[in-house]
Amino acid sequence: MRRRQFFGACAGAGATVAAAATIAASAATSVSAATYLADSDAAQASTNAIPPFKLSVMLWTVYEKLPFDQRLDKVAEAGYNAVELVNEYKNFTKEDYAKFRAKKHELHLTVDATSGISHSLCDASQRDPFLDEVRAKLPVLEELECNKLIILSGDKVPGQTTQQMHDNCIESLKRAADIAAAKNVGLLLENIDPEENPKYFLTSVSEGFEIVRSVHAPNVKFLYDLFHDQIAEGNLLAKLEKNLDLIGVVHIADVPGRHDPGTGEINYPNIFRKLGQLGFNGYVAMEFIPEGETVAALRAAREMAMKYGSAQRNQSAQFISPGRPHATA
């Protein structure tokens, strides 16, 4: 996740974001696709060619300078039926929300997740403001017709140990989970790599899985950002396999540069193949900055995900018992 421009007030909470790409005029390059979590999605099922998992696009990466509704048009043009938001709606009025819903329905789009929480998860002194912010966000999610909220850990707290911040994340997530569950909203804890934000607490995906496992709430999952984890720890395929039951959404971008899948060091055909073999039925969201023309790049990413994600999908178990022992991440 690189969304600093969308979080004016979020810097203190570790919402790190780099500038989004400008519109590229060059020819399309070979790319791939992504998005999110396991819930029934009629819009996704209505596509002509159904991918093995649901595909989405993080909107901040799509034609940042175009008007909001035209950016949605571009997502639909690229063949996607879901979109993820950051805080593009922060100045929306009731009328704006109504227009957005009408546009979304016209394009058969689902908002599978949004972020926008600024207070820290790992700082106990910010727990009450954090929980108040979650409560205040729930009516916004209802306006967006969205049922997943992305949560960031926030920056490290001076004077506190790693264990204290780890425990603070667990306690704050437990309380937030109860609040969100009343509105059937799921929470997604996300990792960020230490190169993008050296101050951010949750740079370790392995620790993120431990936190989600300790929260032990059905509406709390992990947002596995492969771009960040390739930089921070690696070992992506093994983590997918060992922790599939904890993953709500997967984010896609290649290393280096956060560009199209297939342009860097991550073997995305193998990633999509593994997700298909494991029967992952959540969202896989594209969050890459295209090297070429955006719509063509998103189409190529989608085609890659469908091609490799469909391979041998039914040859492995599609369900993991919640009681199975967990291997170390």
Image: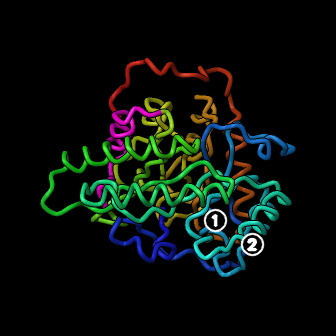
Prevailing secondary structure class for the magenta stretch in the rendered image: helix
Question: Residue furthest toward the left?
Answer: 159
Identify the element where label 2 is drawn: helix
Residue indicated by mark 2: 95
On the image, the x and y values in percent for residue 217 come to 44, 34
The residue under the point 26% across, 57% down is 123
The residue under the point 45% across, 70% down is 17
Question: In the rendered view, does 317 fall on the left or right side of 178?
Answer: right
| Residue 34 visible in image | no
Of the numbered discs 2 and 1, the one sitting upstream in the chain is 1
Q: In the rendered view of the protein, which quadrant contains the C terminus?
A: top left
Q: Magenta segment: does it hold 203?
A: yes
Identify the element where label 1 is drawn: helix
Q: Magenta segment: does it hold 164?
A: no
Query: Is 277 or 119 nearer to us in this picture?
Result: 119
Q: What stretch is highlighted in magenta?
A: 200-217
Displayed quadrant of residue 215:
top left
Q: Residue 59 shows which numbered tag?
A: 1
Question: In the rendered view, does 245 fall on the left or right side of 173?
Answer: right
Question: In the rendered view, does 228 fall on the left or right side of 68?
Answer: left
| Residue 94 visible in image | yes
Query: Is 252 or 9 nearer to us in this picture?
Result: 9
Q: How far apart are the two marked residues, 2 and 1, measured between alpha carbons?
A: 21 Å
Q: In this view, does 193 lie above or below 270?
A: below
Q: Residue 3 shows which numbered tag?
A: none
On the image, the x and y values in percent for residue 183 come to 57, 45
The amino acid pointed to by label 2 is Glu
